[in-house]
Amino acid sequence: MVNLTIDGKQITTAKTSTIYEAAKENGIYIPVLCYAKKLLPYGACRICLVEVEQMKGRLIPSCTTPVTEGMVVTTLSDEIRKVRKTVLEFLLVNHVVDCPVCDKGGECDLQDLTYEYEVVTNRFEGEKFDLPTDEVNPLIERNMNRCVLCGKCVRVCDEVVGYGSYSFINRGFETKIATAFDRGLNCEFCGQCVSMCPVGAILPRPFKFKARPWQLKEVDSVCGYCGNGCTVTLGVKDNQVQTIRFNEDTGVNHGNLCVRGRFGYSYVNDSKRLTKPLIRKGGELKEASWDEAFATITEKFKTAGKDLGIISGARLTNEELLLLKRVSSAIGTQNLDHSGGECYKGLTEGLKETMGISASTGTFPQVEKCDAILAIRSDFYETHPVFGMVINQAIRLNDAQLAVIADKRGKLSKLPNARTLIHKPGCEINMINALCQVIIAEGLAQTAGLQGITELTKALADYTPEAVAGMVGADAEAIKKTARELANAQNAAIVVAYGLPYTAYSKEIAIAAANLALLTGIAGRDGSGLYLCGEKANSQGAVDLQIIPGPAGLGAQQVLSTAAEGKLPVLYLVGEDPLVSYPDQTLVKKALEKTFLVVQDLFMTDSAKYADIVLPAASFAEKEGTFTNAERRIQRLRAGIKSPGEAKTDFAIFQQLLDKLQKTAPTTPAAAFSELTAEVSGYTDIIYEQIGAQGQVWGGETLVPVKKVLVPVAGMEPLQADYQLLVGSALYHSGTVSTRSKGPMSVCPEPYIEFNRDDAATFGVTTGEMVQLKADGVAIQAKVKVDNRLPKGVLFAPYHFGELGLNKIYKGQSVIAVEPGKI
C-alpha cells in the first residue's frame, strides 16, 4: 500500500493505482474524457491534469501517473483550471456544436465540462470539421465531426473485443478515427464503441431521436439471451424498451455487451406479440378468455395424468421453473424436460459421473488472470461473446496462452497468441484424449486423490498425439505444446459451450474435458476452472432445479417420439419452438400433429401454429425473479415494462394452473425463491432481497469437486464423406427469439450456408447465390456465404432460421454428410 496526500486529504491506496484511481476511490473529483476503468491508461485528452509537489509544480495527467509514497497532489487550482479550460477550447476549435440535434445531449462529457469550466467564448479560431457521417450499417452511426480523439473506441475494440475495427489515421489537425481504408463500419456490432464514446461521435442508430436521457427510466435486469448472464440496464419510455443503457458499475460484465444484448431488445416491443389466449375451434385458433383456457387445460392435464409431456425452455426464471416442476408433480407426470433433453447431459451426467457436481467450477473474473486457456469448439465466442471478451482480456493483460480445439476457425482463432488445433469434424474427444495422454506420459499429471488413473492410462494408449493427428488431421506438436501449457500453468481454464446445435456427444465431451481438468488440477483449484456454459439465459438454473425427467419419466426426445406414435395424449411446450430448433423436424412435426398441444410463448411460433391452446407469455423485460448464469451467479431480473394486452408472466400462469389443480403456490417470486432455497443444493442461505448488483455465486468462487473419478471415453471415427455439414450458432443470434429482433436481423437477416473459398470455386458459387444441400434424400437450400475459416470439404449452417428447414437433415449428429449443388 502507498500513502499520499490529495487536496490536503491523507489517503492510503494500492501501489498499482494511478493518481486518478486513488482520488476517485476516495471521493475526490478529477474530470476525464479518455479514461475508462476497463481500459489501459492512455492520457490523450489532458483534462485530468493535476499538480504534484515533488515534480516542481509541473502538471501531469493523473490517469497515467502511478502513485508513489509521500506524493502530494493538488487536483484544482487557478493554474489547473486555466489549463483545463484551454484544453477544452482547443477541442472546440473544430468540433461542430450541434447539441440540439445530437442524441448525446444531456449526457455528453464534453458538454458537461464546457459548462463546468464556463467556456462561453473561444480564443482560438479554426474551420469546423465537415466529414461525411457513416450510416452504412443499420446499428451504429459514426459522426467524426463530433470526435474528441480520446481513442476509447479504438482501445475498447482492441483491448476488450479483440476485433480492431478502428484506428487513428492522418496527422496533426487532420487526425481522425477511421476504419480500415476509411470505409463504412462493418464489424460484429457489439456496440462497445457506442458505450465508450464520451461525446456524440458514435451513437446507436435504433435509438436515434427516440428520447433524451433524462426522459428514460433505467431498470437493471439480466439479458435474456445466453448463459453469460450480463446485466443490462433497460432504458424505458412509454412502456417500451427504447434502448439498452451503458452501466459499467453493475453486474459481472462491467458494461460489456454483445450485439444481441445491446441491440436485440426490440422483440419485447413487437406488435406481433401474443396478447390473448387462443383456443382452436372449428380448426382455427380463436381468441378466448383466460378462464376458458385454464378450464380446458386443467381438464386435459388431469385426464392425461402421468402421460402428460412437458418441455420447457431455459429462459424461464428459477422461480417459474420451480412452479412448473410443481405443476408436473400435481399432475403426477415425470415427463418433464428442457432444451431438447440431450445437450445439457454434459452437466447432469458427464460432470456428475466424474466430479459429483453439475456446474462450472470457477467464475468468469478468474479467467482474466489465467496463464493458459483451452476452448473446446471455435463456436464458443459465437455462443458466449462476452465471455469471449474475458478471454481476450486474459490474453491482453495477462499474456495468457489460448488453444482452441476446433473443426473450423472462428473469432477465438484470431486473438493474439491463439493456437487453433484444427481437426476433422466430430473428433473433439479424440483431441482431448490426446492432451490427457501427453500429460500422463510426460509425468505432468497431478494424480493425488484421483481414482481410475490406471484404467485411463491404459485406455489412452492408442491416443498418442501422433496417432490422433494421423486419424483426425491435427498437428501432433501443437497437441503436445497445448498439453504442457495446461499442465504447467498456475491458473488455467477449460471452456466448453453446449446447446441445441451441439447435442451430439455432450456427455462424452464433458467427461473427456473433466478428465483433463482433473489431471491438470484445474478442477477445484482457486484461480482455475472448468466451464460448461449453456446456450440460454437460465440453462444452469434449469439444471440446478432438476428440470429433467424423473426415474420413470421420458426425456424431451422420448416425449416427442411417443407423441409421434400417437401415444402421448397431451404435450405442454413452454418457451420452446421445437419445430424450428430441435433436431429431426419430421419427427417433431408428427408429434405436434398427433397430440393435444398447449403452447406458452411470446409469439405465434411455427410450433404454436399446431397448438390447440396458445397462452401469451411475458418477456424477460416484464418479469421479476432470478437467473443463474454459467458461472453459478444468481442475479435479479426486474420488470421494466408491462406485458402487452392480457399476456401474463410464466410465473402468473403457473400460479393459476396450480390453483385450478387445487394446489397452493408462492404468491411472489421472492416467496418462491425462499422456498426453492430449501430444495436446491447450493442455494441455501441466499436471500432474494439481498442479491445485489453483482449477484451471488452459489458454491463459492471455486466449486470443489465432490469426487475425482477419471472415466475413459472413446473417441470417434471421422466421417468419410467428400462434403460435411456442421450445424451451430451464428454470432448475431441466440436460439430462435433473436430472429424476432430488429437489431440482430439487420446484420444477419436470413439463413446461409457457409463455404470454403476453394469449395465455392469448385461449385462455381459466390456469396449471395443460391445453393442446395442434399442428405438422405432430403434437400434444403439457402444463399451462399463464402469465407476462409472452414477447412476444404467442410460446410457450416446456423440453426436459428425456420425458413431454412435445417432440422430436416439435422437429427442431432455432430456432422452431416451432404451433397452440395448450385441452383
Image (cartoon, grey):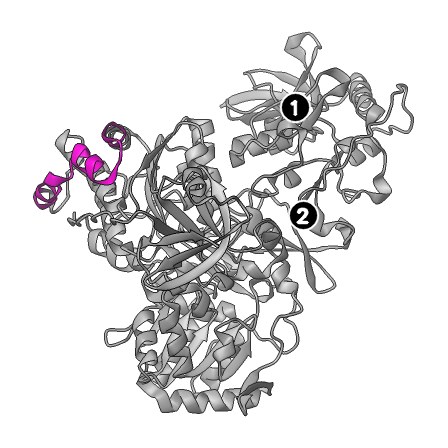
Residue at image position (67%, 29%) is: 182
Where on the picture, by quarter, is residue 559? bottom left
253 up-or-down from 30: above or below:
below
Magenta span: 454-479
Which residue is label 1 attached to?
168
Q: Crowding at label 2, few (<14), some or many (≥20) Cα neighbours within 10 Å?
A: some
Which residue is label 2 attached to?
138
Left or right: residue 59 compared with residue 663: right
Q: Is residue 199 visible?
A: yes
Which of disc 2 and disc 1 is earlier in sequence?
2
Which three-letter amino acid code belongs to the residue tagged 1?
Phe
Q: Crowding at label 1, few (<14), some or many (≥20) Cα neighbours within 10 Å?
A: few
Residue at image position (75%, 23%) is: 76
Across and down, in percent, residue 809 comes to 37, 62
Question: In the current view of this chain or complex, which residue is farthest to the top?
Answer: 56
Left or right: residue 475 compared with residue 267: left
Across and down, in percent, residue 325 comes to 38, 74
Residues tagged 1 and 2 counted as in contact (Cβ below 8 A): no
Which three-letter amino acid code belongs to the residue tagged 2?
Pro
Picture disc at residue 387:
none
Q: For the residue labelled by badge 1, is the local secondary structure a helix, a strand or a loop?
A: strand
Residue at mark 1 to residue at mark 2: CA–CA distance: 23 Å
Nearest the camera: 107 or 526?
A: 107
Q: For the residue labelled by badge 2, is the local secondary structure a helix, a strand or a loop?
A: loop
Nearest the camera: 661 or 617?
A: 617
Q: Is residue 169 magenta?
A: no
Across and down, in percent, residue 357 comes to 27, 55
Across and down, in percent, residue 179 comes to 64, 30
715 up-or-down from 242: above or below:
above
